[in-house]
Amino acid sequence: MADERLLPLAATTGGRVRSAAMAGIIATVTVFAMAQGLTYPLLSFILERQGVISGLIGLSAAMTPLGFIVSAPVIPALSRRIGGGRLAILCSILAAVSLTGIASIQQVWAWMPLRFLLGAFANPLYVISETWLLAVTPARRRGRIMGLYSSVVSGGFAIGPLTLGLAGTEGWPPFLIGIAAFLLCGLIVLAVSRRLPDMPQEGEATSVAAVFVLAPLLLFAVFVAAGFEQILLALFAVYGAALASPEQHIAALITCFIAGNAALQIVLGRLAEQFGSRPTLLFCALASLAGSLLLPVAFGTWLIWPLFFLWGGVSFGLYTLSLIQLGERFTGQSLIAGNAAFALVWGLGGIAGSPATGLAMQMIGHHGLPLSLGLLSGVLAMFLVVRRQA
């Protein structure tokens, strides 16, 4: 195994070394996202074939973000103790083992702890990779690099479900693709480990809880971004069915939303470099609010297609811009604590958003979906405006 005494940040000043490190980090997380993007629909298809009720399928899916939430507070200490490279490689292996267990025991109750472990093992790799990337990225290029990172990771998530069209959803083949992808992540980290910076050691240690005091608005923006993604993926089919829209049309709109998510992050990153990350974050919040208000009007017309493409980009842009601001405001040990807090809040948004919106739709009908999304983005925009004027 390669020497785990990873190079300090000073050794990454060479452009070629820095570029290789950034490429390795992005490749690692993209492959990992592809594997995770494959598991969500795959396991839902299997449980549906087994006749499991929808509520239990949803509870099973919630175990992965729950793993994110529980694991987040311990990631900074673990990375300092055993090293970011070792932890990333270990988590890749353990994620592969967890998916192997899921493939071997196809029973909903056995999957609950295994899917929790899958989330717990996936989370450190995201946190460590984003910390590495923020550490090696020059400040003048932070916007476009983090935009590229968000775009390719979103593309990885989108590719995951598409692989099921080739491998199917029965037997071991789709699971073997996911297991191989998890193991490939560990190999990529091993290959570029000498070019990666140490996990931050300098500065006063900052806990994940302290980040909630230091940057509450950034964390709320991450919560809104997670809520948007999970609510649309989980409940837009219900919204479309209430309007008698064919399933194929709904699926195509969700694909358009994801495509905008992946395509527009680099553009938003460049805007952040030109106009500043805070004004661009406010733009994304206001544009997300506008999309929520326009959804009932545009649905059923050709305008829904450009609306969904742009909506997907700006709603996920809330996360991208928050990540850029994190790199601008935090350094040293507080940077990895901030990334861990982002992961925790992303899990909270993923768990809380869908049930709350589902309840709203039960109470007031299908318009509860755009109302919930508009409320989330509207409150964020209001806070950002107040913060700007303070």
Image (spheres, grey):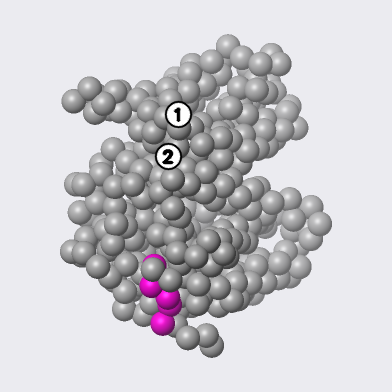
Residue situated in front as seen by the camera: 90 or 8? 8
Quadrant housing residue 74: bottom left
Quadrant housing residue 281: top left
Q: Which residue sits at x=39%, y=67%?
A: 9
Residue 284's mark? 1
What residue is disc 2 on? 321
> Is residue 69 shown to the viewer in this render?
no
Q: Which residue sits at x=56%, y=47%?
A: 148
**Which portion, as a residue range, is magenta?**
5-9
Instruction: Classify mark 1: residues with Cα within 10 Å, few (<14), some (14-19) or many (20+).
Output: many
373 in the magenta segment: no
Secondary structure of the residue carrying numbered label 2: helix
Q: Quadrant of the C terminus?
A: top left
Q: Which residue sits at x=56%, y=18%?
A: 295
Cα distance between the residues tagged 2 and 1: 9 Å
> Is residue 6 shown to the viewer in this render?
yes
Magenta-drawn stretch, dominant element (helix, strand or loop):
loop
Instruction: Classify mark 2: residues with Cα within 10 Å, few (<14), some (14-19) or many (20+).
Output: many
Q: Name, please, the residue furthest toward the front.
A: 14
Secondary structure of the residue carrying numbered label 1: helix
Left or right: 68 as drawn, with respect to 174: left
Amino acid bearing label 1: Cys
Question: 377 above or below 179?
Answer: above
Residue situated in front as seen by the camera: 65 or 5? 5
The answer to whether marks 2 and 1 mark residues whose Cβ atoms lie closer than 8 Å is yes
Question: 284 above or below 335?
Answer: above
Q: Which residue sits at x=34%, y=29%?
A: 380
